[in-house]
Image (cartoon, rainbow, N blue to C red):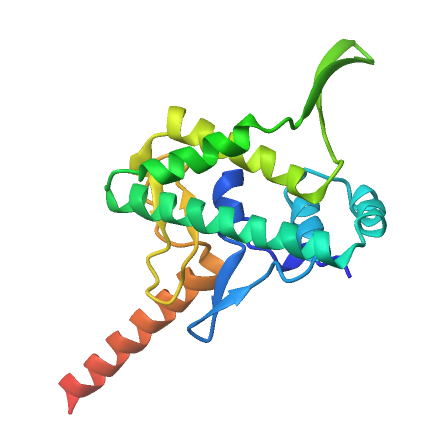
């Protein structure tokens, strides 16, 4: 039921990891957020929820109409964030409508901060309001807002594979990351380049 491993958490950024919940399979769009359990699984995968907390909320949020509406809201917001990422990666201006959508989400009450006693003193911790599924979009909006305000846009990139739609924030030392991951698109590109060189060498010898 809870498949946290199916999500591509390669972006080094929460809002981009959310954008990446829509992937490609065999060249076609592939939706990973089909049910409320999927949304909760993603939230657990990125650390917004614990896995047991996600299971409890799945039992609590069991109304088909409200959960379907939540998924529609989440996917609509994700589409706006994907457009934002696309524009940043392309060096284009960010649409005013995208900024407005993020601001509208930020206006909603999302939780509270409290201090908690720990071994060596106190820590400040944020308690997310989990009264309804859409509240899980609040940290995503906060992440998008922080990115727009503080990130270096030059380091937001789309995987160089033509068949991949995943985005990432390049935090490598030399900022030359090209692929969503070397295990996936990186290895495929290396294999394709090797095959091309081998074919060209064979043709030159003939």
Instruction: State the quadrant of the N terminus.
Output: bottom right
Q: Residue furthest top?
A: 121
Residue 187 sits above or below residue 14 on the image: below
Left or right of residue 116: residue 157: left
Residue at 43% x, 55% y: name it: 166
Residue 107 sits above or below residue 120 on the image: below
Residue at 45% x, 57% y: name it: 182
Q: Where residue 32 appears, x then y in whole percent?
A: 59, 61
Q: Where residue 151 appears, x then y in whole percent?
A: 38, 29
Q: Where residue 88 appears, x then y in whole percent?
A: 31, 41
Residue 12 seen from this side: no
Q: Residue furthest front?
A: 65
Q: Nearer the viewer, residue 181 or 43?
A: 43
Residue 152 sits above or below residue 195 on the image: above
Q: Quadrant of residue 50?
A: top right
Left or right of residue 1: residue 143: left
Residue at 73% x, 40% y: name it: 132
Q: Where residue 21 appears, x then y in whole percent?
A: 54, 55
Q: Nearer the viewer, residue 173 or 83?
A: 83
Q: Residue furthest bottom?
A: 206
How many numbered marks are there? 0
Q: Quadrant of residue 129?
A: top right
Residue 153 seen from this side: yes
């Amino acid at each position: 039921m809870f498949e946290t491993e199916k999500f591509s958490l390669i972006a080094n950024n929460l809002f981009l990891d959310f954008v990446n919940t829509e992937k490609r399979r065999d060249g076609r769009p592939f939706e990973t957020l089909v049910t409320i359990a999927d949304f909760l699984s993603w939230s657990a995968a990125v650390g917004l929820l614990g896995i047991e907390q996600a299971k409890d909320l799945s039992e609590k949020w069991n109304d088909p109409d409200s959960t379907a509406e939540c998924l529609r809201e989440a996917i609509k917001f994700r589409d706006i964030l994907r457009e934002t990422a696309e524009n940043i990666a392309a060096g284009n201006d960010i649409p005013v409508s995208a900024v407005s959508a993020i601001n509208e989400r930020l206006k909603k009450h999302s939780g509270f901060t409290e201090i908690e006693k720990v071994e060596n003193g106190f820590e400040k911790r944020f308690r997310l309001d989990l009264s309804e599924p859409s509240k899980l979009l609040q940290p995503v909006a906060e992440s998008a807002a922080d990115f727009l305000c503080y990130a270096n846009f030059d380091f937001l990139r789309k995987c160089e594979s033509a068949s991949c739609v995943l985005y990432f924030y390049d935090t490598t030392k030399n900022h030359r990351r090209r692929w969503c991951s070397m295990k996936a698109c990186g290895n495929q590109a290396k294999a394709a380049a090797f095959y091309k060189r081998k074919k060209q060498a064979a043709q030159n010898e003939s």
